[in-house]
Amino acid sequence: MLNQESLNVVALANEDTVEDLLRSLGHDVKRLDRQGRRRRPEFLVLFEGRPSFVCEVKTIFSGGYLRDRNAHLSTYDPSLLNSGPATHEVDFSRIESNLTDAVGKYRVLEADDPVLRGIPYLVVLFFDFFADRFHLYPARMESFPAVSGIAKVVENHALDRAARALSLEELERRTREGDFAGLPAESVDFLLVENDCSSVALPTTFIEKCILSHRRAT
């Protein structure tokens, strides 16, 4: 089974990752979730001293529960290890339950601090390997108009694209010789999906610093 204490450590580390990345992009960050007793989103993000958007961080640790094995489809569940191959139907229930919870926190913030009412809202999602449905989730998030967009932290996006453009022989040679000349530097970025149904868009000052997913509902 999943160890909640260990999961909490990972979730907190993911929040730190998001905070560090936001600051590296030139934003200031103020913690919101440690003020008062009511549950709020993690961060108020400021740009040039002014509120820019609110950010919530969610970590999804399981792709589903396997009743026949009494185990979660998760690399964090020791019960799954060595239990044989596993399949699970793709669904978005865990993403949507986390978005529902995120919107609840956003509504609390609006009630507690009316000055922030209607401010853009970003939800950053982290996934266990078996839970990652980010690339399949549609841009048309009709049930979540308060959510301006969802994002995922990705590493070395430009470097990976450049490497895939090389021939296998060239990639093998560069790897063998440690030759990275002309390739992009290592990087950490937000991969952003803007919500087609959002009532308020994220600021351009943030969007232009992200890697954009241009998926659209058809």
Image (cartoon, helix red, strand yellow):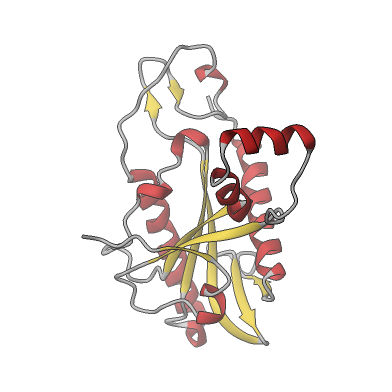
Q: How many marks?
A: 0
Could you say where residue 67 lies in the image, as x and y percent from the top left? 36, 20
As drawn, 99 above or below 89: below
Q: Nearer the viewer, residue 31 or 111?
A: 31
Residue 44 relative to residue 80: left or right: right
Q: Quadrant of residue 194?
A: bottom left
Q: Nearer the viewer, residue 103 or 168?
A: 168
Could you say where residue 163 lies in the image, as x and y percent from the top left? 60, 45
Could you say where residue 75 lies in the image, as x and y percent from the top left? 55, 28
As drawn, 117 above or below 25: below
As drawn, 78 above or below 190: above
> Does residue 40 show up?
no
Q: Nearer the viewer, residue 154 or 58?
A: 154
Residue 201 relative to residue 10: left or right: left
Could you say where residue 196 lies in the image, as x and y percent from the top left? 31, 69
x 34%, y 60%: residue: 215
x 53%, y 12%: residue: 82
> Does residue 46 show up?
yes
Q: Quadrant of residue 107?
A: bottom left
Q: Quarter holding the C terminus?
A: bottom left
Q: Residue furthest left?
A: 218
Residue 14 relative to residue 147: left or right: right
